[in-house]
Structures are given as C-alpha cells and as structure tokens.
C-alpha cells in the first residue's frame, strides 16, 4: 500500500512541476526584466544646486598617561603633547591620586580648541575640573580616583601656537618632607586631522 501511495504522490508532484502551477506561474505569466538603459541612479548636481561632499578623516586610536607630583598648595603641572596637525578627541579620562593621609587633592586638566576659528589660541583655553573620590587609606597613603566618559577636544595647533593637554594638581596643605605624592592621568580617545584653514 505504501509503495502505491509513494508512486501516486511522486507522479502528482511531477505533474505539478511540469505545469508550473506550484510556483504561481501560468501559461500567460511573463518574466520581469530590468532595462539596462533605465536602471541608473542620478542625483542632481549642477552649479545652481551642487551636492555637498564631506570627506571623513581617518580616526586613529590614542591613549597616553601623564603624572604630576604635588607637594603643597601650588599647582604641579605636566604637559602632554598632541601630535602636530592633529586634534585629540578625548572620550575617557581616568585619574588616580596618592597623597599622605589627611591631605586632599584639587585636580584639573586643560585643553585648547579653536572654537571661533580665528586662529588665536590664548582665549580658547578650557579647564576641566576632576572631582576625585576617596578610596581609602592604604599603608598610610590616601588613594582617590576618578574615571568618566566625556567628550573634550584638544587641538595641537591654533594659528602659529602649539598646544596639547595640561595636567595639574595641588594639595590642600604641605606634604611631609620626603612623602610620596602622585596624580596620574590617563587620556583615551582618537586623533583626527585638524581642519584646513579657510
């Protein structure tokens, strides 16, 4: 019985395939084609209505560390150069501070960004304050930390001036003679080409 059923099922399937009705095709159906003379895409681009073109510069990953060693109430500073002809886009900043127990830190970094495009950098300095969070005292050293995503721009050049990142920190008092103090900054992001002068 099963052999007979298989025979009829196979014969019926073959008949359906031959007529094309299994795929919704009939004798009157037509194939659809694409006319190569009419399948082009055209965008209007003329002097009255030109297309805008933007060339994306390649992003190069960047990560660097710089440290300062404050010993009193005056700022201890360090400079991190941005490669010539580049803008550093800072996406994350991490800071760890180590000072004698009982002392606290004021921490910041500064960058320059030619926001108004005038080529004068002295007024384009921006300070970024870092709120340190105390982690505890370990072997007589007070540890504080900071880690945050952000978006900060640092131009390597504005006009004829050369710039980078300035990192600085100071204490709320004087450290004992010979005491270990350190504030370490880590900057992560990417480099892109500075825009061409107009």
Image (tube, rainbow, N blue to C red):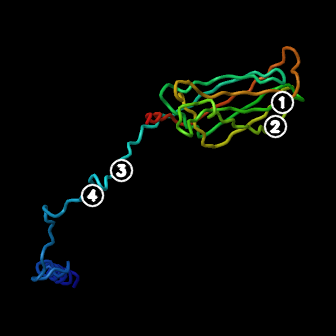
Q: Which mark is residue 52?
A: 3
Residue nearest the viewer, comparing 120 with 38: 120
- Pinpoint residue 33: horizontal percent, then vertical percent: 14, 68
Looking at the image, do the residues carrying marks 3 and 1 touch, with CB atoms under 8 Å apart?
A: no
Work out how far the residue at label 3 is from the one at label 4, CA to CA, in angstroms: 11 Å
Residue 91: horizontal and vertical position, in percent? 59, 40
Which residue is denoted by mark 1 in the rendering? 142
**What residue lies at 73% left-to-right and 37% top-to-bottom?**
130
Q: Earlier in the sequence, mark 4 or mark 2?
A: 4
Precedes in sequence: disc 1 or disc 2? 2
Q: Which residue is mark 2?
A: 134
Instruction: Name which of mark 2 and mark 3 comes first in the sequence.
Output: 3
Q: Quadrant of the N terminus?
A: bottom left
Query: How many badges with numbers are in the image?
Result: 4
Viewer-side label of 4, 2: 4
Residue corresponding to mark 4: 44
**The residue tagged with tag 1: helix, strand or loop?**
strand
- Quarter of the picture holding the C terminus: top left
Residue 91, disc: none
Q: Residues within 10 Å of mark 4 (few under 14, many from 20)?
A: few
Q: Name the residue: 15% across, 72% down.
A: 32
Q: Is label 4 in a helix, a strand or a loop?
A: loop
């Amino acid at each position: 019985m099963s052999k007979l059923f298989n025979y009829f099922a196979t014969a019926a399937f073959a008949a359906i395939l031959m007529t094309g009705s299994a795929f919704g095709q009939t004798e009157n159906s037509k194939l659809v084609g694409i006319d190569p003379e009419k399948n082009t895409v055209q965008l209007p681009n003329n002097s009255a209505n030109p297309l805008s073109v933007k060339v994306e510069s390649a992003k190069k990953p960047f990560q660097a560390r710089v440290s300062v060693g404050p010993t009193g109430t005056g700022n201890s500073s360090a400079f991190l150069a941005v490669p010539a002809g580049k803008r550093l886009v800072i996406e994350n900043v991490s800071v760890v501070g180590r000072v004698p127990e009982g002392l606290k830190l004021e921490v910041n970094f500064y960058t320059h960004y030619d926001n108004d495009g005038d080529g004068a950098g002295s007024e384009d300095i921006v300070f970024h304050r870092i709120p340190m969070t105390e982690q505890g005292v370990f072997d007589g050293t007070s540890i504080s930390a900071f880690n945050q995503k952000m978006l900060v721009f640092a131009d390597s050049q504005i006009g004829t001036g050369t710039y980078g990142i300035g990192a600085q920190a100071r204490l709320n008092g004087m450290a004992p003679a010979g005491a270990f103090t350190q504030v370490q900054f880590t900057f992560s992001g990417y480099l892109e080409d500075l825009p061409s002068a107009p």
